[in-house]
């Protein structure tokens, strides 16, 4: 398989690829490379942080006291930071690469947040479990998660007073897209989801006495439908397969939709709604490797941060600083902007975030300022410039960076060849001229320079 095709695949299905693995895969055929990628993501390894203190409060409770409620909120805030950091670390060092990338993708499709970290952890692991599975099972699981029943008010959806929030977003954002259902479809399907709730531990509970057992009219069909029936009827609409394939195409292929390729994807997906089959079809298709799809997508903030860490492992002494950077870049895991999630694409870049993105490699990897002394030039005001740089572009981060791992991974790569491994898009003439002008530059310094280019923002 071509080297640049493998790099493209591993940026879209993961967060980049290191030289040794790239060279090993380059000797294999495309089918073997894909088999390896999917086989390594068969297993499901839950992401878990220590929630023992919270579990002890929830265990056996029938009603949480106001004092325990305050304690839960405080613990959840602290533990949510732990979960965020644990998730980022999982993305940096995934045991199941594609499954983790798919989990990140689905988290921006089935958007959800909650102030109870136990429920959020359960929701996150539910995404991970179904990330490459059957879409019908997936949607049903989403509908029954404690975090989702709270987030979209399904708990308040009762036959005496239906709440339409979940029913609306199920069709508008999760399965069909706006304009492919009626207001009456929303009202009738909301009745089918009445009675959906959970206990204190976050386990699904169906409360029959609040469920509307009357007949509903949904998509022209009449019956005593429950939530699962509604999801079945939705998935019978080919628009559902098309809608999900559009989202997958935007995320994994190109922000500009190609209707012909999306139709091919939808035909595959509609047969059995198997996500793994769909993704294998996408990654196997010749059009996936077309030049217009390689190095043309703007990395999300998380892809950017994780990609940096794949090259040079970084550890924050204060985990809150990792959240601070996510916030400044515009994407904080577990804290979506709204139920529609992050827009992605060009919305990741504005006048503020592009400056931070271009400066972040030197902020994190070289004490915030690139000294010209490493380029063989004098730099008499280095300490003053370092201080000014930090004041302008960010707080003083306390970081441990592992350049030994970088040197080990790129030991066999010449300095001037680093760009073949670090950059996926073509260099513009100005950047190429600048890099050619660097003399007596170390591998470390050249790597930082490459990561500080606009081209590094693309994958």
Image (cartoon, rainbow, N blue to C red):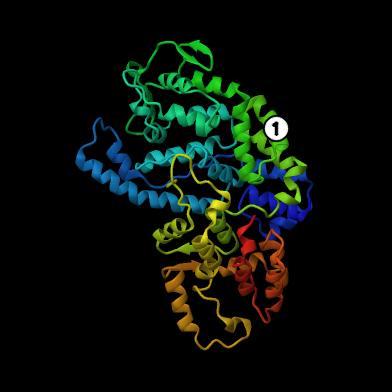
Residue 35 in the image: state x and y as whole percent.
Answer: 71, 41
Instruction: Relative to 418, say whether 42 is above or below.
Output: above
* Total tally of numbered discs in the picture: 1
In the rendered image, residue 112, in percent from the top left (x then y), is placed at 44, 39
Q: Quadrant of residue 251?
A: top right
Coordinates of residue 176 in the picture (x, y in percent)? 56, 29
Q: Quadrant of residue 137?
A: top right
The quarter holding residue 152 reads top left
Residue 420 percent across, percent down from the top left: 72, 63
In the picture, measured across the screen, residue 35 lies left or right of residue 310, that is: right
The relative height of residue 283 versus residue 332 in the rendered view (above or below) is: above
| Residue occupying the point 44% across, 18% down | 188
**Which residue is at the front of the view, 419 or 41?**
419
Q: Is residue 136 left or right of residue 142?
A: right
Kind of element beneath mark 1: helix
| Residue 194, placed above or below residue 22 | above
The answer to whether residue 253 shows anywhere in this view is yes
Q: Quadrant of the C terminus?
A: bottom right
At 33% across and 46% down in the image, what residue appears? 76
Residue at 64 percent across and 49 percent down: it is 12
Pointer 1: what residue?
Answer: 263
Q: Does the rendering let one see residue 414?
A: no
Mark 1 Cα shell of 10 Å, populated few (<14), some (14-19), many (≥20): some
């Amino acid at each position: 398989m071509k080297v640049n095709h493998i790099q493209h695949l591993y940026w879209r299905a993961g967060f980049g690829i290191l030289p040794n693995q790239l060279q090993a895969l380059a000797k294999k055929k495309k089918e073997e490379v894909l088999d390896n990628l999917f086989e390594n993501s068969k297993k499901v390894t839950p992401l878990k942080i220590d929630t023992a203190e919270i579990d002890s409060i929830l265990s056996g409770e029938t009603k949480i006291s106001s004092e325990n409620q305050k304690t839960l909120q405080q613990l959840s805030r602290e533990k949510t930071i732990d979960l965020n950091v644990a998730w980022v670390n999982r993305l940096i060092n995934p045991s199941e690469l594609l499954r983790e990338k798919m989990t990140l993708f689905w988290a921006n499709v089935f958007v959800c947040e909650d102030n109870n970290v136990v429920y959020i952890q359960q929701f996150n692991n539910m995404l991970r479990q179904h990330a490459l599975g059957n879409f019908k099972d997936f949607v049903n699981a989403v509908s029954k998660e404690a975090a989702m029943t709270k987030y979209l008010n399904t708990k308040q959806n009762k036959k005496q007073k239906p709440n339409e929030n979940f029913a609306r977003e199920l069709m508008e954002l999760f399965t069909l897209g706006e304009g492919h259902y009626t207001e009456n479809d929303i009202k009738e399907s909301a009745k089918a989801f009445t009675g959906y709730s959970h206990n204190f531990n976050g386990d699904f509970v169906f409360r029959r006495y609040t469920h509307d057992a009357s007949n509903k009219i949904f998509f022209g069909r009449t019956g005593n439908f429950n939530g699962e029936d509604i999801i079945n009827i939705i998935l019978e609409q080919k628009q559902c397969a098309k809608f999900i394939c559009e989202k997958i195409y935007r995320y994994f292929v190109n922000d500009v939709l190609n209707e012909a390729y999306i139709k091919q994807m939808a035909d595959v997906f509609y047969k059995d709604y198997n996500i793994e089959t769909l993704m294998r079809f996408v990654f196997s298709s010749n059009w996936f490797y077309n030049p217009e799809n390689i190095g043309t997508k703007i990395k999300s903030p998380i892809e950017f941060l994780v990609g940096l860490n794949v090259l040079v492992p970084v550890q924050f002494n204060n985990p809150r600083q990792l959240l601070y950077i996510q916030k400044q870049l515009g994407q904080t895991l577990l804290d979506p902007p709204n139920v529609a999630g992050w827009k992605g694409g060009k919305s990741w870049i504005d006048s503020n975030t592009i400056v931070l993105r271009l400066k972040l490699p030197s902020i994190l990897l070289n004490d915030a300022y690139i000294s010209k002394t490493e380029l063989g030039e004098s730099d008499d005001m280095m300490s003053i410039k370092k201080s000014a740089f930090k004041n302008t572009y960010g707080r003083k981060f306390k970081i441990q960076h592992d350049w030994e791992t970088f040197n080990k991974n790129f030991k066999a790569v010449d300095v001037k060849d680093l760009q073949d491994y670090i950059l996926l898009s073509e260099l513009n003439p100005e950047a190429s001229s600048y890099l050619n002008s660097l003399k007596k530059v170390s591998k470390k310094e050249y790597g930082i320079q490459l990561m500080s280019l606009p081209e590094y923002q693309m994958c």
